[in-house]
Image (tube, grey):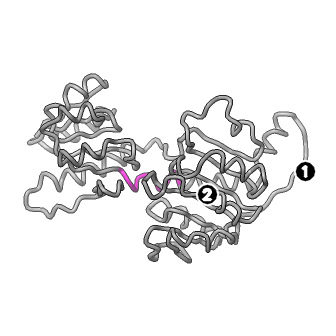
């Protein structure tokens, strides 16, 4: 079996895989060109996307399994993967720690008005009149109540926040006081002090948030999007800010990435933005390869039940 790893690994990790699976031949690619060449003979591809594009997959007649080290798979040619009968797994779940920390630190930054204090620091101004708030006992709405959302809710409970989850099914989830279906979100919005969006990009969630949703939110509400940028149109979000329908937004993802240099979000006084990095951590590759290894054990064990971790439903896209 030929496994092509198009992910940068340190020497220790490479040696671990080679020694742990003597019946498997591993190829560790160091360039896009090398990956596109080697994928033609690979049975398994581990990648961040390289080699899993439509042109490469058309030539990969032996490929049976793709492991992507991201959570989202909307950038992949899912129709081609389905057509060729390739299994697709992802790294869902490995983002929960860093992304939950991002969410809580961001809403704390807004509540504590840290942007204003940093500006005063740059100006060397001692100003004790800047208003601050607390997040303790506030209502936290998390749209997307999966692994990341549940970790956000768990941390929110440490601040005694009332946690409300919104999911496709509306079934109970750990660390949430209440859970509603996505179709019932309008019931929840009037109570949202903080709304954290962790929606993936699917046919059902594209431009999920409309103007009416921001109209329903309290004027003091904060909207944070760290899921996918196409969950809300830029003009809808800007309009909600400029009409003071909501207090502030925190954005890690955008409808257009990279965000253009002249975009009004950059200088908006009620916007905090980061360049799609909420999922970054120095432990990312280690955690992703751990998921891959668990699935590789299942894949290479002929007697095991084939219940893979994070197997993607190609029709749903997650």
**58 sits left or right of 277 in the view:** left
> Which residue occupies the foreground of this view, 296 or 209?
209
Horizontal and vertical percent for residue 72? 40, 48
Q: Which mark is residue 69?
A: none
Horizontal and vertical percent for residue 302? 8, 57
**273 sits left or right of 176 in the view:** right
Horizontal and vertical percent for residue 265? 69, 40
> Which residue occupies the foreground of this view, 130 or 213?
213
Q: How many marks?
A: 2
* Secondary structure beneath label 1: loop
**Quarter holding residue 208:** bottom right
**250 sits left or right of 154 in the view:** right
Which label lies toward us, 2 or 1? 2
Residue of label 1 = 128
> Which residue occupies the foreground of this view, 318 or 203?
203
Q: Which mark is residue 210?
A: 2
**Of marks 2 and 1, which one's residue comes earlier in the chain?**
1
In the picture, the quarter occupied by the N terminus is: top left
Q: Badge 1 local density, few (<14 within 10 Å), some, or many (20+)?
A: few
Q: Which residue is at 32% across, 35% downward?
A: 7
**Magenta-span inclusion, residue 274:** no
Q: Which span is picked out in magenta?
A: 91-99
């Amino acid at each position: 079996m030929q496994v092509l790893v198009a992910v940068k690994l340190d020497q220790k990790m490479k040696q671990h895989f080679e020694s742990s699976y003597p019946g498997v031949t591993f190829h560790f690619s160091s360039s896009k060109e090398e990956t596109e060449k080697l994928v033609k003979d690979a049975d398994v591809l581990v990648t961040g996307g390289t080699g899993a594009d439509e042109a490469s997959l058309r030539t990969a007649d032996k490929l049976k399994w793709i492991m992507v080290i991201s959570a989202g798979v909307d950038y992949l040619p899912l129709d081609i993967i389905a057509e060729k009968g390739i299994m697709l797994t992802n790294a869902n779940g490995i983002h929960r720690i860093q992304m939950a920390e991002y969410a809580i630190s961001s809403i704390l930054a807004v509540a504590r008005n840290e942007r204003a204090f940093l500006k005063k620091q740059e100006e060397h101004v001692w100003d004790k009149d800047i208003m601050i708030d607390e997040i303790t006992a506030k209502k936290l709405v998390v749209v997307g109540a999966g692994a990341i959302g549940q970790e956000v809710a768990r941390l929110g409970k440490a601040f005694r926040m009332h946690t409300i989850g919104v999911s496709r099914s509306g079934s109970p989830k750990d660390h949430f006081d209440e859970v509603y279906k996505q179709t019932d979100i309008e019931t929840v919005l009037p109570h949202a002090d903080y709304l954290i969006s962790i929606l993936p990009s699917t046919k059902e969630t594209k431009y999920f948030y409309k103007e009416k949703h921001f109209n329903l939110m309290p004027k003091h509400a904060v909207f944070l999007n760290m899921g996918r940028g196409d969950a809300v149109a830029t003009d809808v979000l800007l309009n909600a800010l400029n009409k003071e329908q909501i207090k502030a937004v925190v954005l890690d993802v955008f409808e257009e990435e990279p965000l253009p240099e002249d975009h009004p979000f950059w200088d908006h006084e009620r916007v905090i933005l980061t360049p799609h990095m909420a999922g970054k951590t120095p432990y990312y590759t280690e955690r992703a390869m751990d998921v891959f290894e668990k699935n590789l054990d299942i894949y290479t064990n002929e007697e095991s039940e084939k219940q893979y971790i994070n197997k993607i439903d190609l029709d749903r896209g997650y």
